[in-house]
Amino acid sequence: MSSSKRGGKRPGAGRPKGTPNKATSAVKEAAQEYTEEALMALVEIVRDKDAPAAARVSAANSILDRGHGKPTQTIAGDRSSPVTIDFGSLFNTDG
């Protein structure tokens, strides 16, 4: 192993937890200026009887997701082969 001071995790380095990313927040703020216009565009698509059904359904789903939140997705397995999640690799301290 080299004793180089480049790369890797260093204590105290990086943005502190909970501190918002300035670049991301600037983009988010700029995009929020178009919220009403974007919503109205989705409503127009939903109401357009000549629009493809897939476009109308997609627009309707987008409106519902933003207005009521995305529905909860359950994870289910077959009784003969249930869903298993191995979290061991997340907590492995050997490497």
Image: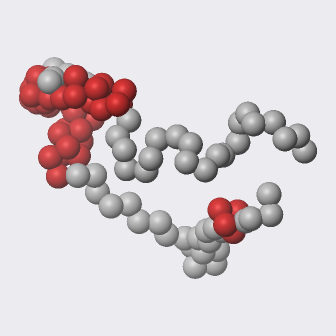
Q: How far across and how far down the image is residue 67, in percent? A: 15, 46
Q: Nearer the viewer, residue 91 or 10?
A: 10
Q: How far across and how far down the image is residue 55, in percent? A: 26, 28
The residue sitting at 23% across, 46% down in the picture is 65
The residue sitting at 23% across, 52% down in the picture is 69
Quadrant in the picture for the C terminus: bottom right
Q: Residue furthest bottom?
A: 79
Q: How far across and how far down the image is residue 88, in percent? A: 69, 68
Q: Nearer the viewer, residue 66 or 43?
A: 66
Q: Residue 66, relative to residue 59: is it above or below?
A: below
Q: Residue 78, relative to residue 8: is it above or below?
A: below
Please state the total of marks drawn on the protein image.
0
Residue 36 sits in quarter: top left
Q: Nearer the viewer, residue 67 or 42?
A: 67
Q: Is residue 58 left or right of residue 11?
A: left
Q: Is residue 63 left or right of residue 55?
A: left
Residue 26 sits in quarter: top left
Q: How far across and how far down the image is residue 32, in percent? A: 18, 29
